[in-house]
Image (tube, rainbow, N blue to C red):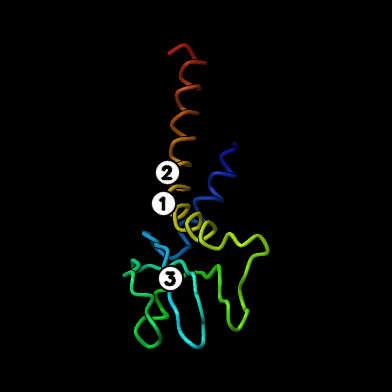
Amino acid sequence: MREDELEKIEELCSAATPAPWFVRTLDDDSAMNLVAVSTAPDTGAAERWPNFDHRDMVAATLVQHPRYVDSGDERWDENAAFIAMAREAVPRLVEEVRRLQALLADEGSGQ
């Protein structure tokens, strides 16, 4: 990867809501079976409104009723897990790419 590509990824990461992110399962009459990515951990209680703070939500991968957010392949849990994991993994991957590029550069220069 080129340095400008890595810089763009870093900019996007820096601009996003800070980590950590968690998968939350919530449920109420306005957002039945909501699978979300949140800055607050899941409590396991599938809270109903107003027992969760909507400001903690970063993204939703399923809002079943009304059907606002859904995926045709029904991988909403997997998609939420990927999004939450990516928040911390992508910055680490950028660091690792740079570290490996520096090692290759050092080897190529005979150091």
Whether residue 65 sits left or right of residue 48 in the image: it is right
Whether residue 61 sits left or right of residue 48 in the image: it is right
Could you tell me how far apart the alpha carbons at marks 1 and 3 are, in whole angstroms? 20 Å
| Rendering coords of residue 3 (x, y %) | 56, 39
To which residue does mark 2 refer?
92
Residue 25 tag number? 3
What kind of residue is marked 2? Answer: Arg
Residue at 50% x, 58% y is: 83
Q: Is residue 75 above or below residue 105?
A: below
Mark 2 and mark 1 residues within 8 Å of each other at the beta carbon: yes
First in sequence: mark 2 vs mark 3: 3
**In the structure shown, which secondary structural element does the residue marked by tag 2 occupy?**
helix
Are there few (<14), some (14-19), or many (20+) residues within 10 Å of tag 2?
A: few
Question: Given the current orientation, which residue lies at the most extreme right position?
Answer: 72
| Rendering coords of residue 25 (x, y %) | 43, 70
What kind of residue is marked 1? Answer: Glu
Residue at 51% x, 80% y is: 32
Q: Is residue 86 above or below residue 31?
A: above
To which residue does mark 1 refer?
88
Are there few (<14), some (14-19), or many (20+) residues within 10 Å of tag 1?
A: some
What kind of residue is marked 3? Answer: Thr
| Rendering coords of residue 91 (x, y %) | 44, 47
